[in-house]
Amino acid sequence: MLDGHIHIERGEYTLEWIDKFINKALEQDMDEIWFLEHCYRFKEFVPMYDSVCAYSEYIDKWFHKKAGIFQLEDYLKLISNVREKSFPVNIKFGLEICYFKKFEAFVADLTRDKELDFLLGSVHFVDEFAFDHKSEHWNNLNIDRIYTRYFETSIELIKCGIYDGIAHPDCVKLFGHTPSFSLIEYYEEMAQALSLQRMYAEQSSGIFRRCPDTAELGMNRDMLKCMKKHNVKIITVSDAHCPEDVGSKIPELNKLIVEA
């Protein structure tokens, strides 16, 4: 079994910290695990977030507590150290990068020839709105517009040609807000674009773990059907941010894929 989305940001860049994730993966019968970091952890990516920080005082405070902690080279050194060792599970390393259309070339230049195993694109901002922080931030906003722009932005991410996969492809649903219209056409367009670009989509337990009362486990069933219809590669992931969550509900995610 595979867990393709594991964050290591809550510990030091040491082999001892990596071992904690590996030990949990073995407990959970994982054969392969993919480590990554949010790009904003690195000073090089901080300029991408100026507009979203200016849009929201909340995000400005949150961002400047977490962002720019390391240089990208710090992470690459850790990757090199891990690759020199032998482990009982297969390990890959990548980056999760927030998608902003105007920074496509910027991201491509920063990540070129860095010997990363994968680049994962994610949509965490609809225009400047950080939709996945607090449910109350949605108050008095146009839900239909947020959903429309979320999927339009996701499709732009896919078509830009930079990324190997798209993270949690319908995480806009996490707080239970629903649009007044069917999303099938967006699911179809997204699946077709992923297939054309030969990108994978995540089947994630992370949103459900965070919001069990309002979020589905994994992709919406109709979205998952579209992904299978267009032969999109689907990667099971926990979106773990600590060792304890590695492998979370991966068997259940696989079962949902089979049954869709």
Image (cartoon, rainbow, N blue to C red):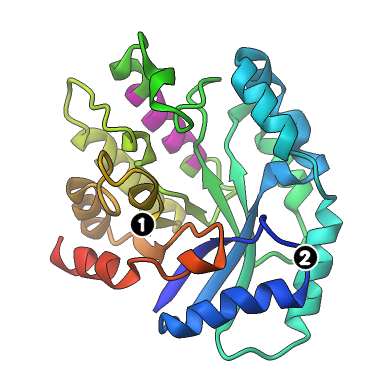
Q: Whole-percent x and y of residue 203? A: 35, 58
Q: Quadrant of residue 140?
A: top left
State the residue at coordinates (24%, 59%): 228
Q: Quadrant of residue 134?
A: top left
Q: Residues within 10 Å of mark 1 (few under 14, many from 20)?
A: many
State the residue at coordinates (61%, 14%): 55
Residue picked out by circle 2? 13
State the residue at coordinates (55%, 57%): 241
Instruction: Give the secondary structure at mark 1.
Output: loop
Residue picked out by circle 1? 205
- Looking at the magenta stretch, what is its main secondary structure? helix
Asked if disc 2 and disc 1 are in contact, CB closer than 8 Å, the reply is no
Pick the quarter of the image with the N terminus. Answer: bottom left
- Name the residue nearer the viewer: 205 or 109: 205
Residue extending farthest left: 259
Q: Mark 2 vs mark 1: which is more N-terminal?
A: 2
Q: Quadrant of residue 103?
A: top right
In the rendered structure, which segment of residues is drawn in magenta?
Answer: 147-157
Whether residue 50 sits left or right of residue 87 in the image: it is right
Whether residue 45 sits left or right of residue 161 in the image: it is right
Q: Is residue 157 above or below residue 257?
A: above
Q: Is residue 151 above or below residue 159?
A: above
**Amino acid of disc 1:** Ser
Instruction: Give the secondary structure at mark 2.
Output: loop
Q: Residues within 10 Å of mark 2 (few under 14, many from 20)?
A: some
